[in-house]
Amino acid sequence: MIETEGRMYQDLTKILVTREEIAAKVDELGKKITADYQGKAPVLICILKGGAVFFTDLARAIDLPLTMEFMAISSYGSATKTSGVVRVVKDLDNDILNKDVIIVEDIVDSGVTLNYLKGMLGHRGAASIRIVTLLDKPARRRVKDLKVDYSCFNIPDEFVVGYGLDYDQKYRNLPDIGVLSPNVYEK
Ligand code: IMP
Ligand code: MG
């Protein structure tokens, strides 16, 4: 239990990544993407809702004439596990034909969600597609050949919340990333 901060922190067993560590990584990643996409105007796609907090910080760390798109998907399953069946809840507003697409996700777990998305956007004729994730849980990967192009933090196989990531739609506004106490979801 963490007693030094606000109410939501009482539901964490520990803080895994602090807001300072996140800010430093996001800045570094923004510079890298800026360099890698020189002369280009990529389309940055936010995967709602989990990717939203990371997305807005990352976009401002990239110095390119990028455009923003938002997409919402839902994967059937329990609150802490993906089933592998993905459904588009909100699609892109503009087409991505011949565009350099950068998908921004909160976390790659099994990889099923991103693998599906990458395939789908590839069929729409994007010039290139790269994947950016804030967190990666490599131990849980089921899609072994999924290429994650940019990843900020590798984390162990624990259920985390904060900085966009939720449990039952809550904790997204937590500024740090922490491990959710099992008694919250075993209740
Ligand atoms: P995947 O298809 O198994 O890679 O699942 C990715 C999605 O599962 C993410 O976009 C999250 O919404 C959710 N997810 C996986 N692990 C966690 C976690 O530790 N905390 C919160 N959401 C998670
Ligand atoms: Mg989620």
Image: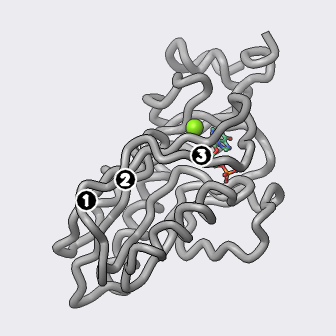
Quarter of the image where the C terminus is located: top right
Can you identify the residue that label 3 sits on?
A: 17
Vertical relation: 20 (above or below) 5? below
For residue 144, which quarter of the picture?
bottom right
Residue at position x 26%, y 88% in the image: 38
Ligand 1 in which quarter: top right
Residue at position x 21%, y 90% in the image: 39
Label 1, residues with CA under 10 Å away: few <14, some 14-19, many ≥20: some
Circles 1 and 3: CB atoms closer than 8 Å:
no
Can you identify the residue that label 1 sits on?
A: 68
Which amino acid does the dot numbered 2 rest on? Answer: Phe
Separation of residues labelled 3 and 2 (CA atoms): 17 Å
Mark linked to residue 36? none
Circles 2 and 1: CB atoms closer than 8 Å:
yes
For residue 142, which quarter of the picture?
bottom right
Residue 64, position in %: x, y?
A: 21, 75
Using residue 48 as the reference point, say whether residue 111 is left or right of it. Answer: right
